[in-house]
Image (cartoon, grey):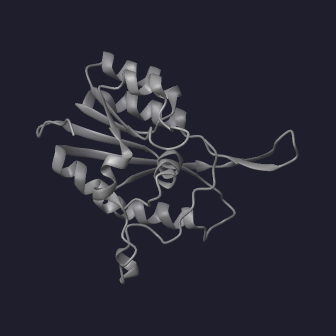
Amino acid sequence: MDFYKDERIGLFIDGANLHAAARSLGFDIDYKQLLNIFKKEGQLIRAHYYTATLEDQKNSPIRSLVDWLDYNGYSMITKPAKEYIDPAGHRKIKGNMDIEIAIDAIEMCEHLDHIVLFSGDGDFRRLVEAIQRRGTRVTVVSTVRSNPPLAADELRRQADVFIELEDLKEKIERSFNERDNDNLPYPKNTKVPFED
């Protein structure tokens, strides 16, 4: 990875996008290990995790994940998911967090030397460009090894550094042999049910 020890680092994690990328590569993320990796790379100032939640599902796996992350070093940014019926009559749930990520990254970039964006969404290209104009480096973490690739080419080209998520797999893959449920890196069988 391309970090300097004295860099102030901020993580901006698009929860649904990262979950989809890891699942497409066939693994689950150990969020404790993910945090530890970036603590070793520089001065980790903040780790933001963005996700939409369903208000009527208090005991859902996503709610458990949100609670666990909130108590274990992540700043949680959530909003209620929106339900709608698509033109084919199917019930859909939408939980896009792009605006929240963009606003927070722009506001914080003057206090950070390096932003790590966990998303492959091409819509973030202009955000990355705006952050770079303010003097902050940007690393994008996603995957091009899935089928189809989840990292947009324009976002990869704009980033200062692109990290292939699969290259981090060995360091951040969740092990399923933990015995103590209180120390799990996140609740078992967590599914992110929202579209991007």
Q: What's the residue at 43%, 41% (across, down)?
A: 143
Q: Residue furthest bottom?
A: 179
Q: Residue furthest left?
A: 6
> Quadrant location of the C terminus?
top right
In depth, the one of 75 and 195 nearer the eye is: 195
In depth, the one of 2 and 45 nearer the eye is: 2
Residue 112 makes an appearance in the image: no
Does residue 36 lie above or below 145 as drawn? below
Q: Is residue 169 left or right of residue 26?
A: left
Q: Position of residue 122 (x, y in %)?
A: 51, 28
Q: Is residue 33 left or right of residue 17?
A: left
Q: Is residue 97 left or right of residue 56?
A: left
Does residue 106 lie above or below 118 as drawn? above
Q: What's the residue at 47%, 70% (across, down)?
A: 187
In depth, the one of 160 and 56 nearer the eye is: 160
Residue 5 makes an appearance in the image: yes
Q: Residue furthest top?
A: 133
Q: Is residue 42 left or right of residue 145?
A: left
Count of marks overlaid on the render: 0
Q: Position of residue 115 (x, y in %)?
A: 31, 34
Q: Position of residue 158 (x, y in %)?
A: 38, 21
Q: Position of residue 146 (x, y in %)?
A: 49, 44
Q: What's the residue at 21%, 40% (across, down)?
A: 1
